[in-house]
Amino acid sequence: MIVGIDASNIRVGGGVTHLVELLRIADPIKSGIQKVVVFAGKKTLDRIEAREDWLRKVHVPDLDKGLALRMLWQRFRLLSALKDEDCGVLLVPGGVHSAGFSPIVAMSQNLLPFEWRELRRYGLSWMALKMTLLRFVQGKTFREAGGVIFLTNYAKRAVTNVVGEDLRSIAVIPLGIHNRFLASPKDALPILRYSNDDPFRLLYVSVIDVYKHQWHVTAAVAKLRSLGYPVVLDLVGSSLPRSLVRLTEAIAQVDPTGTFIRYRGPVAHEELSLLYRQCDVNVFASSCENMPNILIEAMASGLPIACSNRGPMSEVLRDAGVYFDPENPDEISSAIKALIDSPDVRAANAKKAFAYAQEYSWERCAEMTFAYLRDVATRD
């Protein structure tokens, strides 16, 4: 059996990380798969490690270009490419397929198109239009697919509530975590051990976007400072222009001198593990996630976590976090304060979170994914 992977719209972010890690650790021959053929642009292929025994990387120049050419290639040229490679099943990690090949296994990695409450935050914008179109296009792909992979049970429920529950086959396969993030919880010190010169460090890693609520976290930290807590907040991640303006204005209002809140911009994924090790509490305030990889990275890093109570966060973090409404700065402040005030709670939660994080491995993800691809192919 030969598996094809359509990576025509896998170019940045978590989708690329998933593909790179999946193929880095996989041993598909164990699942009865002879070869895996990846169709992608150069930048994506360059990040995928060579595996001479079973992996073929096919560079498609059109996939280095704009959206229109990528869509045209998928619609009119992918099918013949799959036939040329004698592929028996196609994995579509981007969740959109128009080539007419069968069977395919589609992945759901973006929940924004299926949650109107979150999508409405963008107002009348290109992003809102794009996500609305994806809602219909991905929905059509999922209904026609031989199988659909969801990353969490929450995501499965959210999507099937929109597209219907009569999908041909469904699998829930969580992503993994890289070993570089694994770090045993450090000692939880009382707040009296900290000062403005040696502050209690908070970290929030995520893209600056409308559903990430960094401005509410900013207001919450400012409230803690007003109560005399020697806390500082580092915000890390890329940004969307309008959201960055909102964040910059929020920081200027509460900390115009940049004393205790700093936006550090994007940091290479390979360097994030060091930032986790340098902080005392991780904050995660997103209100829309398919599978919160950043949250799992913080768990694996042995950190106590103040966490949003929306989406799949409680499914992943379970009883190892202090939860808050991500749109309520007072609740965010109270959750962080509860962790600061109790070293025992910090220690206990970090220990549980670290243990739960061990369940997420790329080895398990790869094994389950290729076994599912084989099952869909042989069933059809």
Image (spheres, rainbow, N blue to C red):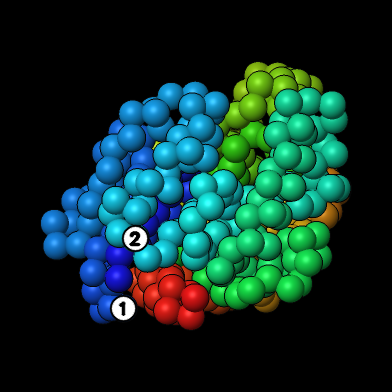
> Residue placed at 76% from the left, 32% from the top?
129
Question: Residue 31 location, x and y as percent?
Answer: 31, 78
- What count of labels does the image hold? 2
Q: Is residue 143 left or right of residue 362?
A: right
Query: Sequence order check: which comes first, mark 1 or mark 2?
Result: 1
Quick check: 99 left or right of 157?
Answer: left
Q: Nearer the viewer, residue 96 or 75?
A: 75
For mark 2, what is the residue? 87
Residue 350 appears left or right of 164: left
Amino acid identity at mark 2: Cys
Q: Residue at x 40, y 75 (%)?
A: 374
Residue 86, compared with residue 146, is above or below; it is above
Residue at numbered disc 1: 31
Does 356 sit above or below residue 98? below
Circle 1 SS class: helix
**Mark 2 residue element:** loop
Q: Classify residue 209 by image quadrant.
A: top right
Marks 1 and 2 close (CB-CB < 8 Å): no
Which dot marks residue 122?
Answer: none
Q: Position of residue 21 (x, y in %)?
A: 35, 57
Query: In this view of the protein, can residue 379 be seen by the observer?
Result: yes
Camera-nearest residue between 147 and 363: 147
- Residue 26 vs 23, above or below: the answer is below
Look at 14% across and 62% down and name the residue there: 53
Is residue 215 visible to the viewer in this orientation of the structure? no
Characterize the local packing of mark 1: few (<14), some (14-19) or many (20 or more) Cα atoms within 10 angstroms.
Answer: some
